[in-house]
Image (cartoon, rainbow, N blue to C red):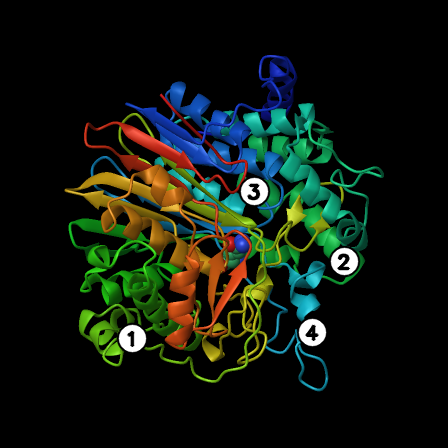
Amino acid sequence: MKYLGKKTALLLALFCTLAHIRAQIVPFPYDIQKEATGDSAMVVTAHPLATKVGLDVLRKGGNAVDAAVAVQFALAVVYPQAGNIGGGGFLIYHGKDDQTAALDYREKAPAAATEKMYLDSAGNVLPNKSRLGVLACGVPGTVDGMWEAHKKYGRRPWGELVTPAIELAIRGYQITEQEAQNLNEERFTFIRHSSIQPAFVKLENWVAGDWLIQKELAVTLSRIAGYGRDDFYKGATASLIVNEMSKTGGLITREDLRRYKSVWRTPLEFDYKNLHIITMPPPSSGGILLRQLLAMTGDHPLKDSGFHSTAAVHLMVEAERRAYADRAMHMGDPDFWKVPVKKLTDMAYLKSRMADFQPNKATPSAKVTAGQIKESEETTHFSIIDPEGNAVSVTTTLNDSYGSRVVVSGAGFILNNEMDDFSAKPGAPNLYGAIGGKANAVAPDKRPLSSMTPVIATKGGKTWLVVGTPGGTTIPTSVFQVIVNVAEFGMSLPEAVQAKRFHHQWTPDKIFIEEGALTEAVIQQLIEMGHFVEPRDPIGRVEAILRLADGIWQGVADERGDDAAGGF
Ligand code: DON
């Protein structure tokens, strides 16, 4: 047994927690490292405290999966807008022996979900219904996912890996400026959608440096430390989730929780020039999209055109337009819909998709009703390398910022609003402006289509790049740009990650650009070619690790947030 046993363990976890309280304090304001190097190990996450937790596990002899488990639980405490135990995610593994694995711990629709559950009687979409409150929640997969990953690869005891999160929850931690701002913005949505006043709500405004203490979450995590995944899916935490549902008309039942299982899937693997890419298959669209984008642009002399030149942006956008059209039509949960992965990733097919590409003219997207891309970044990615050379790439989410804003009373954690990733109605845009049809319609027990794209790229069988990001539908195009920036434009990893980004997703027919991404001259030329260009807020928060020529690991955390890298 790798996990602690029963009640003694629970008491032990609490005891350890209290005993370590003072030792773990990290001075505030945090010393956030955006770049780090290490000849042995590297951790890059969305929060400096989570990065520290991962490094501590690796220093104690834990491997990359142990560190990933500890980081996932730590992020559930210190990064509540996306770190979670009430959501789901995907994990990509590449072992030092070149073994690969892909774990799908995506949320599932409850058994009582129906295809038209987000429509009114006239058949119109009720967008808030899939985004806020209990009806937005899928059955969470994170705790089972961590349990499965640990069962297969973990080395350190389970309880030990959950303990740092318990400590952070019970002792509290000081919030950053960005976190204070986010919590202030969400005060009323939390009050409205939770049946109790959660720890995230305070009468006065939160300010940087305030302590966020999450006692209920600490108790939940202690139970998970002691009893493992069964607490969440069959035990006391399951009861609290079902209780929350019954108070407010939610659909998740005890049976839904009991039946939840994460799934080991065959990773999507393909070659791109001298790289071998290992990434997520459906129910993510991300891996297929990345393959399509790299294949559709790979033959063209991107490097000669130049970084963010009109020709390079035009080519990349035209590939994105075509790839996202495929996403809307063909992709969904493979357990429910036959996703034609082979065809969609076939080189001949992809060449044919670009047959009508015109180097000087935009191809207008098909006329399909579509909405705006919402401007928030509330998934999170972390990348880890352990001293033995095993690598883990994890993207995990509640979907929107703070998910459904439902905090399970008595359990202290936020439930996801992943149901919005389904297509509520053919052609109706979701939160990210993504449209879909039958392939991604709501159905009982089905997983909503995702864009999350955790990637490990290898060279000669050895890990070369670990990368991923949040950003909804912008995830695949952000990962695409980081890979192209390094592999084609010859940028250093810090340059590649911090470079401004752009995004096109077929519908709406617009190139979204971060401020300053493109020069006025390039924007003008793109408009003359028939493109529509629209500025938007920052795109993505990339966490990446690269093996440098001398074998040293370089970690880079995105400057767009509080993200932090650390290595040794
Ligand atoms: O699975 C997906 O594709 C989305 N639920 C991810 C959400 C996300 O990245 C939020 N950040 N903007």
Label 2 to label 1, Cα distance in Å? 58 Å
For the residue labelled by badge 2, is the local secondary structure a helix, a strand or a loop?
Answer: helix
Quarter assignment of residue 74: top right
Residue depicted at 29% across the width and 75% down the height: 360
Q: Answer whether residue 420 is visible to the viewer in this image.
A: yes
Q: Tell me, yes or no, if residue 338 can be seen here.
A: no
Where disc 1 sits, the SS reads loop
The residue carrying mark 1 is 360
Look at the numbered discs 2 and 1 and tell me whether their residues touch, using CB distance below 8 Å.
no
Mark nearer the N terminus (3 vs 1): 3
Residue that extends furthest to the bottom in the rendered view of this protein? 122
* Residue displayed at 22% across by 44% down: 458
Dot 4, how many residues are within 10 Å of its Cα: few (below 14), some (14-19), or many (20+)?
A: few
Which mark lies nearer to you, 1 or 4? 1
* Element marked by disc 3: loop
Task: Relative to 424, say whether 197 is above or below.
Answer: above
Q: Residues within 10 Å of mark 3 (few under 14, many from 20)?
A: many
424 left or right of 533? right
The residue indicated by pointer 4 is: 126
Relative to 135, say whether 546 is above or below: above
Against 98, residue 102 (above or below) is below
Residue 106, position in %: x, y?
A: 49, 55
User: Can you tell which of label 2 and label 1 is closer to the viewer?
Assistant: 1
Of the residues under marks 3 and 2, which one precedes in the sequence?
3
Quarter of the image containing the C terminus? top left
